[in-house]
Image: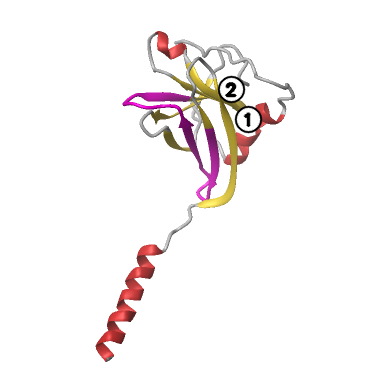
Amino acid sequence: MKNWAVCFVMLAAVACSETEVVNEFTGRETVYALQPASAYAVSGTVTFKERKDGHTTVSVELSGTSGPARHPVHLHLGDLATPDADIAALLTPVAAATGKSETTLAVLADESAVTYDALMELRASVKIHLADTGPERDIILAAGNIGRAFTEDVASGRTKIALCQSN
């Protein structure tokens, strides 16, 4: 009987240590809708989650993608209608097979540090492109305003989506 009690205590200790999850997030998050932006029926969400280390996890989840492609994700300065909007950050491409992407964002393209609060104050948009290069680079699969561009957008109906700056 004593051996069973020792085994139970050891099993409980191992089970507890394996299931203990260290939460790296503060609990603050904002979710924005991504609307279809071309003839492709692709839509989804982009979620910004504040991390305890001061960084932000940006997660994209799309429906309507498939295959082996990787779709570039850009955080642009300005709202969706801003022509030739500068890229504030290159995010991890979406894997078309899963429709998902996750990036931990700590600095912008200009190497300035950025926090969750700063991102929520940024007048910006997220655009997911069909490809990195060639004519498919200008095809935007899905897009949405974030931060101040979202909260200040008072237009009803579909927003115009401008092409991105070409390099």
Name the kind of residue labelled 2 in the image. Leu
Residue 113 visible in the snapshot: no
Q: Secondary structure at mark 1?
A: loop
Q: Residue at x 63, y 21 (%)?
A: 79
Q: Is residue 152 above or below residue 83?
A: below
Decide which of 50, 100 is in the foreground and name it.
100
**Segment tinted magenta in the rendering:** 45-73
Decide which of 84, 72 is in the foreground and name it.
72
The majority secondary structure of the magenta stretch comes to strand
What percent of the width, then of the height, locates residue 49?
A: 54, 43
- Is the residue marked by circle 1 packed among few (<14), some (14-19), or many (20+) residues within 10 Å? many
Q: Quadrant of residue 121?
A: top right
What percent of the width, then of the height, locates residue 155?
A: 73, 21
Q: Residue furthest bottom?
A: 1
CB-based contact (under 8 Å), mark 2 and mark 1: yes
Decide which of 28, 8 is in the foreground and name it.
8
- Quadrant for the N terminus in the image: bottom left
- Residue picked out by circle 2: 77
Label 2, label 1: how far apart the Cα atoms are: 8 Å
Q: Is residue 41 above or below residue 8?
A: above
Judge from the rendering whether residue 85 lies leftward or rightward of residue 23; answer left or right: right
Q: Which mark is residue 16?
A: none
- Residue picked out by circle 1: 122
